[in-house]
Amino acid sequence: MKLNQLKPLSEDSYPDNLGIMEMFKFYQLASSEQKKQMKSLINKKDFKRCWDLLTKVTGIKLEPVT
């Protein structure tokens, strides 16, 4: 994949895959309770709520892929 082919970060582009860099940032900023909550959501495979928690903690904005 070439750099100009990269798409914006989007819940639609990663429906069940939480990005490594995004998770790294999350674990740097999250409280112990938020980390436990994330682990629980991942175990339940509730990736919609994982993305919601990740964006809340990190401030990363998701954009629709066009």
Image: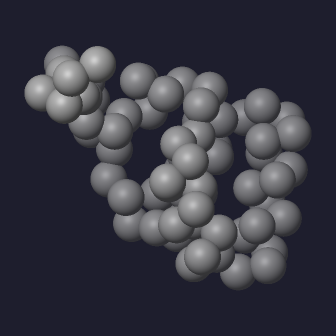
Q: Quadrant of the C terminus?
A: top left
Residue 42 placement, left or right of 29: right
Residue plotted at (41% across, 24% down)? 12
Colouring: one colour
Q: Is residue 27 above or below residue 14?
A: below
| Picture coordinates of residue 13, whole percent (x, y) | 41, 24
Residue plotted at (80% across, 75% down)? 33
Q: Quadrant of the N terminus?
A: top left
Q: Is residue 53 above or below residue 45?
A: below
Indicate the quadrant where residue 47 lies.
top right
| Picture coordinates of residue 55, whole percent (x, y) | 46, 57
Indicate the quadrant where residue 43 lies.
top right
Residue plotted at (52% across, 66% down)? 25
Residue plotted at (54% across, 25% down)? 15
Residue sitting farthest toward the front: 2
Residue 12 placement, left or right of 43: left
Residue sitting farthest toward the left: 4
Residue 2 placement, left or right of 55: left
In the depicted view, which residue is nearer to us: 12 or 25?
25
| Picture coordinates of residue 56, whole percent (x, y) | 49, 64
| Picture coordinates of residue 32, whole percent (x, y) | 79, 79
Q: Is residue 35 above or below residue 20?
A: below
How many discs appear?
Answer: 0
